[in-house]
Amino acid sequence: MQAQKKRNQILPALIFLLPGFVLFIVFFLGPLLYSFRISFYNWNFAHSDRSVFVGLQNYITQIKSAIFQRAVINTLVYTVITVAVKMVCGFFVAVLLNQKLRGRTFFRVAYYLPVITSWVIVSLLFTFLFSGQGGLVNYLLHNVLHVVDKDIMWLADPILALVPVVLVDIWKGVGWTVVIFLAGLQGIPAELVEAAAVDGANRWQRLVNIILPMMHGTLVFLLVVQVLGGLNSYVSFQLITKGNPMDLTHSILTLMYRATFTRLDFGGGAAISYMLTIFVFALSVIQLKLLRRPAGE
Amino acid sequence: MKRSHNLFNLFSYVILILGLFIVAVPFWYMISTAFKPQTMVFDLPPQFWPNPSTLSNFVKAFSEDNFGLYFWNSVQVTIASTLLTVLISSLLAFAFARLQFPFKETLFYVLLLGMMVPPVMLIIPQFVISHWLHLYNNLWGLILVYVTMNISMQTFLLRGVFEDVPRDLEEAAMIDGGTPWTIFMKIILPLSGPGLAVVVINSFLYAWEEYAWANVNIGDSAKRTLPIGIALFQTAHLTEWGQVFAASLAALVPVVIIFIVFQKYFVQGISTTGLKG
Protein backbone atom coordinates (compact mmCIF):
# COMPACT_ATOMS: atom_id res chain seq x y z
CA MET A 1 0.00 0.00 0.00
CA GLN A 2 2.72 2.41 1.05
CA ALA A 3 4.95 1.45 -1.88
CA GLN A 4 2.10 1.80 -4.31
CA LYS A 5 1.27 5.24 -2.98
CA LYS A 6 4.89 6.26 -3.47
CA ARG A 7 5.03 5.06 -7.05
CA ASN A 8 1.85 6.93 -7.78
CA GLN A 9 3.53 10.18 -6.84
CA ILE A 10 6.33 10.05 -9.41
CA LEU A 11 4.17 11.30 -12.24
CA PRO A 12 2.66 14.23 -10.30
CA ALA A 13 6.11 15.07 -8.95
CA LEU A 14 7.43 15.24 -12.49
CA ILE A 15 4.69 17.68 -13.46
CA PHE A 16 5.32 19.88 -10.43
CA LEU A 17 9.08 19.90 -10.97
CA LEU A 18 9.26 20.22 -14.73
CA PRO A 19 8.69 23.96 -15.37
CA GLY A 20 11.13 25.00 -12.64
CA PHE A 21 13.87 22.58 -13.61
CA VAL A 22 13.65 23.38 -17.32
CA LEU A 23 14.28 27.04 -16.56
CA PHE A 24 16.92 26.17 -13.98
CA ILE A 25 18.86 24.01 -16.43
CA VAL A 26 18.61 26.41 -19.39
CA PHE A 27 19.36 29.68 -17.58
CA PHE A 28 21.35 28.60 -14.53
CA LEU A 29 23.01 25.21 -14.60
CA GLY A 30 23.78 25.32 -18.31
CA PRO A 31 25.31 28.80 -18.14
CA LEU A 32 27.28 27.86 -15.02
CA LEU A 33 28.95 24.95 -16.82
CA TYR A 34 29.21 26.78 -20.12
CA SER A 35 31.05 29.70 -18.60
CA PHE A 36 33.52 27.23 -17.08
CA ARG A 37 34.26 26.08 -20.63
CA ILE A 38 34.52 29.63 -22.00
CA SER A 39 37.11 30.46 -19.35
CA PHE A 40 39.57 28.01 -20.95
CA TYR A 41 39.28 29.48 -24.43
CA ASN A 42 40.30 32.53 -26.34
CA TRP A 43 36.61 32.85 -27.03
CA ASN A 44 35.25 34.07 -30.34
CA PHE A 45 31.75 35.35 -29.69
CA ALA A 46 30.66 35.66 -33.32
CA HIS A 47 32.04 32.25 -34.37
CA SER A 48 32.34 30.12 -31.27
CA ASP A 49 33.66 27.18 -33.35
CA ARG A 50 36.78 29.24 -34.09
CA SER A 51 37.59 29.70 -30.41
CA VAL A 52 41.06 28.52 -29.43
CA PHE A 53 41.70 26.40 -26.34
CA VAL A 54 44.28 28.15 -24.16
CA GLY A 55 44.15 26.10 -20.97
CA LEU A 56 44.71 28.16 -17.83
CA GLN A 57 46.07 31.14 -19.76
CA ASN A 58 43.05 33.39 -19.06
CA TYR A 59 43.35 32.76 -15.34
CA ILE A 60 47.10 33.37 -15.31
CA THR A 61 46.81 36.57 -17.37
CA GLN A 62 44.22 37.95 -14.97
CA ILE A 63 46.04 37.02 -11.79
CA LYS A 64 49.20 38.68 -13.09
CA SER A 65 47.42 41.83 -14.25
CA ALA A 66 47.85 44.90 -12.04
CA ILE A 67 44.30 46.07 -12.80
CA PHE A 68 42.87 42.76 -11.61
CA GLN A 69 44.95 42.84 -8.44
CA ARG A 70 43.79 46.38 -7.79
CA ALA A 71 40.15 45.33 -8.30
CA VAL A 72 40.58 42.49 -5.79
CA ILE A 73 42.09 44.86 -3.24
CA ASN A 74 39.34 47.44 -3.81
CA THR A 75 36.66 44.80 -3.37
CA LEU A 76 38.20 43.35 -0.20
CA VAL A 77 38.82 46.71 1.46
CA TYR A 78 35.33 47.86 0.52
CA THR A 79 33.81 44.67 1.92
CA VAL A 80 35.68 44.82 5.22
CA ILE A 81 34.84 48.48 5.86
CA THR A 82 31.18 48.36 4.85
CA VAL A 83 30.41 45.10 6.65
CA ALA A 84 32.10 46.22 9.85
CA VAL A 85 30.32 49.58 9.95
CA LYS A 86 26.93 48.11 9.05
CA MET A 87 27.23 45.41 11.70
CA VAL A 88 28.24 47.78 14.51
CA CYS A 89 25.81 50.60 13.65
CA GLY A 90 22.99 48.18 12.89
CA PHE A 91 23.47 46.40 16.20
CA PHE A 92 23.42 49.56 18.30
CA VAL A 93 20.43 51.03 16.51
CA ALA A 94 18.61 47.72 16.96
CA VAL A 95 19.38 47.74 20.69
CA LEU A 96 18.00 51.29 20.92
CA LEU A 97 14.88 50.35 18.96
CA ASN A 98 14.32 47.28 21.11
CA GLN A 99 13.07 49.41 24.02
CA LYS A 100 9.58 50.70 24.63
CA LEU A 101 10.02 53.96 22.78
CA ARG A 102 7.44 56.27 21.31
CA GLY A 103 7.74 56.26 17.51
CA ARG A 104 9.60 52.95 17.29
CA THR A 105 7.73 51.75 14.21
CA PHE A 106 8.24 55.09 12.52
CA PHE A 107 12.02 54.90 12.95
CA ARG A 108 12.09 51.33 11.75
CA VAL A 109 10.15 52.14 8.59
CA ALA A 110 12.22 55.26 7.91
CA TYR A 111 15.52 53.39 8.27
CA TYR A 112 14.21 50.76 5.90
CA LEU A 113 13.45 53.18 3.04
CA PRO A 114 17.01 53.20 1.62
CA VAL A 115 16.94 49.39 1.66
CA ILE A 116 14.01 49.22 -0.74
CA THR A 117 15.35 51.99 -2.98
CA SER A 118 17.12 50.51 -5.99
CA TRP A 119 20.90 50.44 -6.36
CA VAL A 120 20.63 52.46 -9.54
CA ILE A 121 18.80 55.32 -7.81
CA VAL A 122 20.98 55.44 -4.69
CA SER A 123 24.18 55.22 -6.75
CA LEU A 124 23.14 58.13 -8.94
CA LEU A 125 22.03 60.07 -5.88
CA PHE A 126 25.43 59.69 -4.23
CA THR A 127 27.20 60.57 -7.48
CA PHE A 128 25.21 63.79 -7.41
CA LEU A 129 25.89 64.49 -3.71
CA PHE A 130 29.63 64.00 -4.34
CA SER A 131 29.77 66.25 -7.44
CA GLY A 132 33.02 68.19 -7.61
CA GLN A 133 31.38 71.58 -8.07
CA GLY A 134 28.05 72.40 -6.48
CA GLY A 135 27.82 69.04 -4.69
CA LEU A 136 26.18 68.91 -1.30
CA VAL A 137 29.08 67.10 0.38
CA ASN A 138 31.68 69.61 -0.83
CA TYR A 139 29.40 72.44 0.24
CA LEU A 140 29.17 70.92 3.70
CA LEU A 141 32.91 70.30 4.04
CA HIS A 142 34.12 73.50 2.39
CA ASN A 143 31.55 76.24 2.99
CA VAL A 144 29.85 75.09 6.21
CA LEU A 145 32.40 73.18 8.26
CA HIS A 146 35.52 74.70 6.64
CA VAL A 147 37.50 71.46 7.06
CA VAL A 148 38.83 71.74 3.49
CA ASP A 149 39.90 74.93 1.76
CA LYS A 150 38.78 73.99 -1.75
CA ASP A 151 36.27 71.66 -3.39
CA ILE A 152 37.36 68.02 -3.56
CA MET A 153 37.20 66.32 -6.95
CA TRP A 154 36.02 63.03 -5.47
CA LEU A 155 35.64 61.04 -8.67
CA ALA A 156 38.96 62.11 -10.20
CA ASP A 157 41.06 60.46 -7.51
CA PRO A 158 41.51 56.67 -7.39
CA ILE A 159 41.21 56.52 -3.59
CA LEU A 160 38.69 59.29 -2.94
CA ALA A 161 36.40 57.90 -5.65
CA LEU A 162 35.78 54.90 -3.42
CA VAL A 163 34.43 57.08 -0.60
CA PRO A 164 30.95 57.57 -2.12
CA VAL A 165 30.87 53.88 -3.07
CA VAL A 166 31.55 52.84 0.51
CA LEU A 167 29.20 55.41 2.02
CA VAL A 168 26.29 54.57 -0.26
CA ASP A 169 26.54 50.92 0.72
CA ILE A 170 26.48 51.78 4.41
CA TRP A 171 23.65 54.28 3.96
CA LYS A 172 21.57 51.78 2.02
CA GLY A 173 22.45 48.72 4.08
CA VAL A 174 22.20 49.67 7.76
CA GLY A 175 18.38 49.48 7.76
CA TRP A 176 18.53 45.84 6.78
CA THR A 177 20.99 44.85 9.50
CA VAL A 178 18.80 46.75 11.99
CA VAL A 179 15.73 44.69 11.04
CA ILE A 180 17.60 41.38 11.22
CA PHE A 181 19.25 42.29 14.54
CA LEU A 182 15.87 43.36 15.94
CA ALA A 183 14.41 39.99 14.98
CA GLY A 184 17.28 38.31 16.82
CA LEU A 185 16.93 40.56 19.88
CA GLN A 186 13.22 39.86 20.12
CA GLY A 187 13.99 36.16 20.31
CA ILE A 188 15.85 36.64 23.61
CA PRO A 189 13.60 35.93 26.61
CA ALA A 190 12.98 39.17 28.50
CA GLU A 191 13.04 37.35 31.89
CA LEU A 192 16.66 36.43 31.32
CA VAL A 193 17.75 40.03 30.83
CA GLU A 194 15.57 41.23 33.71
CA ALA A 195 16.97 38.58 36.03
CA ALA A 196 20.47 39.79 35.27
CA ALA A 197 19.40 43.37 35.93
CA VAL A 198 18.00 42.31 39.31
CA ASP A 199 21.33 40.64 40.08
CA GLY A 200 23.01 43.99 39.54
CA ALA A 201 24.39 43.63 36.00
CA ASN A 202 24.53 47.04 34.33
CA ARG A 203 23.44 47.76 30.79
CA TRP A 204 26.87 47.09 29.31
CA GLN A 205 27.36 43.82 31.24
CA ARG A 206 23.95 42.57 30.12
CA LEU A 207 24.85 43.39 26.52
CA VAL A 208 28.21 41.65 26.54
CA ASN A 209 27.44 38.67 28.77
CA ILE A 210 23.87 37.80 27.83
CA ILE A 211 22.63 39.47 24.67
CA LEU A 212 25.69 39.06 22.42
CA PRO A 213 26.24 35.33 23.12
CA MET A 214 22.56 34.65 22.46
CA MET A 215 22.80 36.42 19.11
CA HIS A 216 25.43 34.02 17.76
CA GLY A 217 23.20 32.67 14.97
CA THR A 218 22.09 36.13 13.84
CA LEU A 219 25.66 37.42 13.84
CA VAL A 220 26.96 34.58 11.68
CA PHE A 221 24.03 34.90 9.27
CA LEU A 222 24.49 38.66 8.84
CA LEU A 223 28.24 38.42 8.56
CA VAL A 224 28.18 35.84 5.79
CA VAL A 225 25.33 37.35 3.79
CA GLN A 226 26.95 40.77 3.89
CA VAL A 227 30.44 39.55 3.04
CA LEU A 228 28.98 37.75 0.02
CA GLY A 229 27.06 40.89 -0.94
CA GLY A 230 30.21 43.00 -0.63
CA LEU A 231 32.32 40.69 -2.78
CA ASN A 232 29.64 40.78 -5.45
CA SER A 233 29.30 44.55 -5.57
CA TYR A 234 28.62 45.72 -9.04
CA VAL A 235 26.00 48.41 -9.66
CA SER A 236 27.40 51.05 -7.29
CA PHE A 237 30.95 50.73 -8.68
CA GLN A 238 29.64 50.66 -12.24
CA LEU A 239 27.52 53.79 -11.88
CA ILE A 240 29.64 55.87 -9.50
CA THR A 241 33.27 55.34 -10.55
CA LYS A 242 32.88 53.34 -13.79
CA GLY A 243 36.41 52.08 -12.99
CA ASN A 244 37.81 55.60 -13.49
CA PRO A 245 40.37 57.01 -13.25
CA MET A 246 42.67 54.66 -15.20
CA ASP A 247 40.85 51.44 -14.26
CA LEU A 248 42.02 51.84 -10.67
CA THR A 249 38.58 51.78 -9.03
CA HIS A 250 37.03 48.58 -10.37
CA SER A 251 35.30 45.97 -8.26
CA ILE A 252 35.90 42.37 -9.36
CA LEU A 253 32.61 42.26 -11.20
CA THR A 254 32.86 45.62 -12.96
CA LEU A 255 36.26 44.46 -14.22
CA MET A 256 34.60 41.26 -15.43
CA TYR A 257 32.04 43.38 -17.27
CA ARG A 258 34.72 45.56 -18.83
CA ALA A 259 36.82 42.59 -19.96
CA THR A 260 33.80 40.95 -21.55
CA PHE A 261 31.67 43.66 -23.05
CA THR A 262 34.14 46.48 -23.66
CA ARG A 263 37.22 44.51 -24.68
CA LEU A 264 35.26 41.46 -25.91
CA ASP A 265 37.62 39.15 -24.00
CA PHE A 266 34.89 36.66 -23.06
CA GLY A 267 37.42 34.10 -21.85
CA GLY A 268 39.09 36.59 -19.52
CA GLY A 269 35.74 37.77 -18.17
CA ALA A 270 34.60 34.20 -17.57
CA ALA A 271 37.88 33.43 -15.77
CA ILE A 272 37.36 36.42 -13.46
CA SER A 273 33.80 35.42 -12.66
CA TYR A 274 34.83 31.81 -12.04
CA MET A 275 37.54 32.76 -9.60
CA LEU A 276 34.98 34.82 -7.68
CA THR A 277 32.36 32.06 -7.92
CA ILE A 278 34.68 29.48 -6.40
CA PHE A 279 35.63 31.81 -3.57
CA VAL A 280 32.00 32.72 -2.88
CA PHE A 281 30.90 29.11 -3.09
CA ALA A 282 33.49 28.09 -0.51
CA LEU A 283 32.26 30.85 1.79
CA SER A 284 28.65 29.69 1.37
CA VAL A 285 29.59 26.15 2.33
CA ILE A 286 31.35 27.45 5.43
CA GLN A 287 28.20 29.45 6.22
CA LEU A 288 26.01 26.34 6.01
CA LYS A 289 28.42 24.47 8.29
CA LEU A 290 28.49 27.27 10.84
CA LEU A 291 24.73 27.69 10.86
CA ARG A 292 24.05 23.99 11.20
CA ARG A 293 26.29 23.75 14.25
CA PRO A 294 24.00 23.89 17.28
CA ALA A 295 24.37 27.55 18.22
CA GLY A 296 26.92 28.16 20.97
CA GLU A 297 24.47 29.03 23.71
CA MET B 1 17.78 53.84 38.58
CA LYS B 2 14.79 55.82 37.32
CA ARG B 3 16.97 58.77 36.45
CA SER B 4 19.51 56.71 34.54
CA HIS B 5 16.61 55.23 32.62
CA ASN B 6 15.39 58.67 31.54
CA LEU B 7 18.89 59.69 30.55
CA PHE B 8 19.25 56.58 28.45
CA ASN B 9 15.91 57.35 26.79
CA LEU B 10 17.09 60.83 25.93
CA PHE B 11 20.35 59.46 24.58
CA SER B 12 18.40 56.95 22.46
CA TYR B 13 16.28 59.68 20.91
CA VAL B 14 19.29 61.84 20.12
CA ILE B 15 20.99 58.97 18.29
CA LEU B 16 17.84 57.82 16.51
CA ILE B 17 16.95 61.32 15.31
CA LEU B 18 20.52 61.86 14.12
CA GLY B 19 20.17 58.62 12.12
CA LEU B 20 16.85 59.78 10.74
CA PHE B 21 18.51 62.97 9.59
CA ILE B 22 21.24 61.05 7.76
CA VAL B 23 18.62 58.91 6.01
CA ALA B 24 16.32 61.80 5.17
CA VAL B 25 18.65 64.52 3.86
CA PRO B 26 19.79 62.71 0.67
CA PHE B 27 16.18 61.71 -0.05
CA TRP B 28 14.92 65.18 0.50
CA TYR B 29 17.66 66.69 -1.66
CA MET B 30 16.75 64.26 -4.44
CA ILE B 31 13.08 65.25 -4.25
CA SER B 32 13.83 68.97 -4.20
CA THR B 33 16.22 68.62 -7.17
CA ALA B 34 13.50 66.92 -9.20
CA PHE B 35 11.41 70.09 -8.80
CA LYS B 36 14.22 72.54 -9.66
CA PRO B 37 14.73 74.22 -13.02
CA GLN B 38 18.02 73.11 -14.64
CA THR B 39 19.73 76.44 -13.86
CA MET B 40 19.30 75.93 -10.11
CA VAL B 41 20.57 72.37 -9.81
CA PHE B 42 24.09 73.33 -8.73
CA ASP B 43 23.19 76.58 -6.97
CA LEU B 44 24.97 77.30 -3.71
CA PRO B 45 23.91 77.49 -0.98
CA PRO B 46 21.82 74.43 -1.92
CA GLN B 47 18.08 75.00 -1.95
CA PHE B 48 16.12 72.40 -0.06
CA TRP B 49 12.81 74.07 -0.86
CA PRO B 50 13.18 75.18 -4.48
CA ASN B 51 11.80 78.59 -5.31
CA PRO B 52 10.64 78.81 -8.05
CA SER B 53 9.71 75.14 -8.29
CA THR B 54 8.69 73.46 -11.51
CA LEU B 55 7.14 70.28 -12.87
CA SER B 56 9.02 70.57 -16.16
CA ASN B 57 11.48 67.78 -15.27
CA PHE B 58 8.61 65.32 -14.93
CA VAL B 59 6.93 66.57 -18.10
CA LYS B 60 10.15 66.37 -20.14
CA ALA B 61 11.17 62.98 -18.72
CA PHE B 62 7.86 61.42 -19.63
CA SER B 63 7.33 63.10 -23.00
CA GLU B 64 10.61 63.76 -24.82
CA ASP B 65 12.79 61.29 -22.99
CA ASN B 66 10.69 58.13 -23.21
CA PHE B 67 10.51 57.35 -19.52
CA GLY B 68 6.82 56.56 -19.95
CA LEU B 69 7.80 53.77 -22.33
CA TYR B 70 10.54 52.51 -19.99
CA PHE B 71 8.04 52.55 -17.15
CA TRP B 72 5.60 50.47 -19.17
CA ASN B 73 8.36 47.98 -20.14
CA SER B 74 9.26 47.65 -16.47
CA VAL B 75 5.62 47.09 -15.54
CA GLN B 76 5.26 44.26 -18.07
CA VAL B 77 8.52 42.58 -17.09
CA THR B 78 7.77 42.88 -13.39
CA ILE B 79 4.21 41.55 -13.54
CA ALA B 80 5.13 38.61 -15.77
CA SER B 81 8.17 37.60 -13.75
CA THR B 82 6.40 37.98 -10.42
CA LEU B 83 3.47 35.80 -11.51
CA LEU B 84 5.76 33.17 -13.00
CA THR B 85 8.05 33.15 -9.97
CA VAL B 86 5.13 32.65 -7.59
CA LEU B 87 3.64 29.89 -9.74
CA ILE B 88 6.83 27.98 -10.50
CA SER B 89 8.37 28.20 -7.05
CA SER B 90 5.18 27.10 -5.32
CA LEU B 91 4.94 24.10 -7.67
CA LEU B 92 8.55 23.20 -6.83
CA ALA B 93 8.07 23.83 -3.13
CA PHE B 94 4.96 21.64 -3.02
CA ALA B 95 6.83 18.76 -4.64
CA PHE B 96 9.69 19.07 -2.16
CA ALA B 97 7.41 19.54 0.85
CA ARG B 98 4.76 16.89 0.18
CA LEU B 99 5.54 14.40 -2.61
CA GLN B 100 7.77 11.34 -2.54
CA PHE B 101 10.05 10.75 -5.53
CA PRO B 102 13.54 9.42 -6.24
CA PHE B 103 16.59 11.71 -5.79
CA LYS B 104 14.47 14.22 -3.88
CA GLU B 105 17.28 15.35 -1.56
CA THR B 106 19.82 15.55 -4.38
CA LEU B 107 17.54 17.61 -6.60
CA PHE B 108 16.80 19.96 -3.74
CA TYR B 109 20.49 20.58 -3.09
CA VAL B 110 21.14 21.12 -6.80
CA LEU B 111 18.38 23.73 -6.80
CA LEU B 112 19.91 25.42 -3.75
CA LEU B 113 23.08 26.02 -5.78
CA GLY B 114 21.10 28.90 -7.23
CA MET B 115 21.30 30.69 -3.89
CA MET B 116 25.07 30.48 -3.80
CA VAL B 117 25.98 31.81 -7.22
CA PRO B 118 25.26 35.52 -7.57
CA PRO B 119 23.39 36.55 -10.72
CA VAL B 120 25.96 38.96 -12.16
CA MET B 121 28.50 36.14 -12.54
CA LEU B 122 26.31 34.37 -15.04
CA ILE B 123 25.69 37.25 -17.41
CA ILE B 124 28.40 36.17 -19.88
CA PRO B 125 27.04 32.67 -20.62
CA GLN B 126 23.46 33.91 -20.29
CA PHE B 127 24.25 36.53 -22.91
CA VAL B 128 25.53 33.79 -25.26
CA ILE B 129 22.49 31.59 -24.62
CA SER B 130 20.11 34.51 -25.00
CA HIS B 131 21.50 35.02 -28.52
CA TRP B 132 21.02 31.35 -29.38
CA LEU B 133 17.40 31.38 -28.18
CA HIS B 134 16.65 34.71 -29.91
CA LEU B 135 15.92 36.33 -26.55
CA TYR B 136 18.41 39.15 -27.04
CA ASN B 137 16.61 42.51 -27.15
CA ASN B 138 13.47 40.76 -26.00
CA LEU B 139 11.63 41.40 -22.75
CA TRP B 140 11.08 37.64 -22.38
CA GLY B 141 14.86 37.34 -22.12
CA LEU B 142 14.63 39.45 -18.97
CA ILE B 143 11.54 37.72 -17.59
CA LEU B 144 12.84 34.15 -17.90
CA VAL B 145 16.21 35.00 -16.40
CA TYR B 146 14.64 36.91 -13.49
CA VAL B 147 12.37 33.96 -12.72
CA THR B 148 15.32 31.56 -12.83
CA MET B 149 17.49 33.71 -10.58
CA ASN B 150 14.65 33.87 -8.05
CA ILE B 151 13.27 30.35 -7.89
CA SER B 152 15.98 28.79 -5.71
CA MET B 153 15.56 31.20 -2.85
CA GLN B 154 11.77 31.44 -3.14
CA THR B 155 11.33 27.67 -3.36
CA PHE B 156 13.47 27.26 -0.26
CA LEU B 157 11.31 29.82 1.53
CA LEU B 158 7.98 28.36 0.39
CA ARG B 159 8.97 24.78 1.20
CA GLY B 160 9.28 25.87 4.82
CA VAL B 161 5.90 27.60 4.67
CA PHE B 162 4.14 24.60 3.08
CA GLU B 163 5.66 22.19 5.58
CA ASP B 164 4.00 24.15 8.37
CA VAL B 165 0.51 23.55 6.97
CA PRO B 166 -1.06 20.84 9.20
CA ARG B 167 -1.17 17.47 7.47
CA ASP B 168 -4.49 16.21 8.90
CA LEU B 169 -6.39 18.47 6.50
CA GLU B 170 -4.75 16.73 3.57
CA GLU B 171 -5.32 13.27 4.91
CA ALA B 172 -9.03 14.02 5.04
CA ALA B 173 -8.89 15.27 1.46
CA MET B 174 -6.89 12.19 0.39
CA ILE B 175 -9.55 9.88 1.77
CA ASP B 176 -12.12 11.80 -0.27
CA GLY B 177 -10.08 10.93 -3.36
CA GLY B 178 -8.18 14.23 -3.69
CA THR B 179 -5.17 14.34 -6.03
CA PRO B 180 -1.93 16.21 -5.25
CA TRP B 181 -3.17 18.97 -7.55
CA THR B 182 -6.41 19.53 -5.59
CA ILE B 183 -4.49 19.46 -2.31
CA PHE B 184 -2.07 22.03 -3.70
CA MET B 185 -4.82 24.32 -4.99
CA LYS B 186 -7.50 23.89 -2.31
CA ILE B 187 -5.48 23.43 0.88
CA ILE B 188 -1.84 24.42 0.66
CA LEU B 189 -2.06 27.63 -1.37
CA PRO B 190 -5.04 29.20 0.48
CA LEU B 191 -3.35 28.58 3.84
CA SER B 192 0.00 30.11 2.81
CA GLY B 193 -1.01 33.72 2.16
CA PRO B 194 1.71 35.51 4.13
CA GLY B 195 4.46 33.28 2.71
CA LEU B 196 3.24 33.89 -0.82
CA ALA B 197 3.11 37.62 -0.12
CA VAL B 198 6.80 37.55 0.79
CA VAL B 199 7.56 35.80 -2.50
CA VAL B 200 5.53 38.44 -4.36
CA ILE B 201 7.48 41.25 -2.70
CA ASN B 202 10.86 39.63 -3.29
CA SER B 203 10.27 38.92 -6.95
CA PHE B 204 8.60 42.28 -7.56
CA LEU B 205 11.57 44.17 -6.12
CA TYR B 206 14.07 42.03 -8.02
CA ALA B 207 12.46 42.56 -11.42
CA TRP B 208 11.67 46.23 -10.85
CA GLU B 209 15.19 47.16 -9.78
CA GLU B 210 17.42 44.78 -11.75
CA TYR B 211 20.16 46.52 -13.70
CA ALA B 212 23.07 44.26 -14.66
CA TRP B 213 21.29 41.73 -16.86
CA ALA B 214 18.91 44.25 -18.46
CA ASN B 215 21.90 46.43 -19.34
CA VAL B 216 23.49 43.50 -21.19
CA ASN B 217 20.47 41.90 -22.80
CA ILE B 218 18.69 45.03 -24.05
CA GLY B 219 20.35 47.00 -26.83
CA ASP B 220 17.30 48.55 -28.47
CA SER B 221 16.39 51.79 -26.68
CA ALA B 222 12.64 51.15 -27.12
CA LYS B 223 12.96 47.97 -25.00
CA ARG B 224 14.72 49.56 -22.02
CA THR B 225 13.40 49.03 -18.52
CA LEU B 226 13.44 51.86 -15.97
CA PRO B 227 16.74 51.10 -14.18
CA ILE B 228 18.77 51.04 -17.40
CA GLY B 229 16.71 53.90 -18.84
CA ILE B 230 17.61 56.07 -15.86
CA ALA B 231 21.28 55.03 -15.75
CA LEU B 232 21.84 55.50 -19.49
CA PHE B 233 20.07 58.86 -19.45
CA GLN B 234 22.43 60.05 -16.73
CA THR B 235 25.47 58.86 -18.70
CA ALA B 236 24.26 60.72 -21.77
CA HIS B 237 23.16 63.94 -20.01
CA LEU B 238 25.69 64.34 -17.24
CA THR B 239 24.20 67.42 -15.60
CA GLU B 240 20.46 67.03 -16.08
CA TRP B 241 19.89 65.79 -12.57
CA GLY B 242 16.38 67.21 -12.35
CA GLN B 243 15.15 64.77 -14.97
CA VAL B 244 17.20 61.89 -13.58
CA PHE B 245 15.56 62.31 -10.19
CA ALA B 246 12.10 62.96 -11.61
CA ALA B 247 12.32 59.57 -13.33
CA SER B 248 13.85 58.03 -10.18
CA LEU B 249 10.96 59.27 -8.06
CA ALA B 250 8.47 57.82 -10.53
CA ALA B 251 10.33 54.49 -10.25
CA LEU B 252 10.32 54.70 -6.47
CA VAL B 253 6.58 55.36 -5.99
CA PRO B 254 5.33 51.80 -6.73
CA VAL B 255 8.01 50.36 -4.44
CA VAL B 256 7.03 52.57 -1.52
CA ILE B 257 3.32 51.83 -2.06
CA ILE B 258 3.93 48.07 -2.14
CA PHE B 259 6.14 48.34 0.93
CA ILE B 260 3.55 50.25 2.94
CA VAL B 261 0.57 48.12 1.82
CA PHE B 262 2.32 44.79 2.34
CA GLN B 263 4.22 45.75 5.46
CA LYS B 264 1.93 43.74 7.73
CA TYR B 265 2.25 40.67 5.52
CA PHE B 266 5.93 41.28 5.25
CA VAL B 267 6.39 41.04 9.02
CA GLN B 268 4.04 38.04 9.22
CA GLY B 269 5.89 36.41 6.33
CA ILE B 270 9.23 36.87 8.01
CA SER B 271 7.90 35.17 11.14
CA THR B 272 6.44 32.23 9.20
CA THR B 273 9.79 31.63 7.57
CA GLY B 274 11.63 31.37 10.84
CA LEU B 275 12.96 34.87 11.35
CA LYS B 276 10.84 36.45 14.02
CA GLY B 277 10.14 40.10 13.53
Image: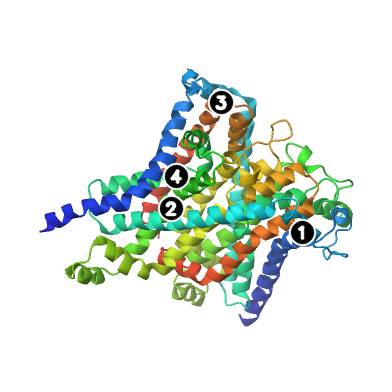
In this rendering, position of residue B51 left or right of residue B183: right
| Disc 1 with disc 4 on a shared chain | yes
**Residue identifier under label 1:** B59
Q: Is residue A203 shown to the viewer in this render?
A: yes
Lower sequence index among marks 2 and 4: 4
Q: Nearer the viewer, mark 1 or mark 4?
A: 1
Earlier sequence position, callout 1 versus callout 4: 1
Confirm whether circles 1 and 3 share one chain. Answer: no
Rendered image: mark on residue B116: 4
Kindly identify which chain the residue marked by label 3 belongs to.
Answer: A
Tag 3: amino acid: Ile
Q: Which residue is mark 3?
A: A63
Do callouts 3 and 4 point to residues on the same chain? no
How far, Cα to Cα, is label 1 from label 3?
49 Å
Which residue matches tag 2?
B153
**What's the amino acid at mark 4?**
Met
Subunit that carries the residue with mark 2: B
Both marks 2 and 1 on one chain? yes
Give residue A82's mark. none
Residue A234: x and y, percent? 60, 42
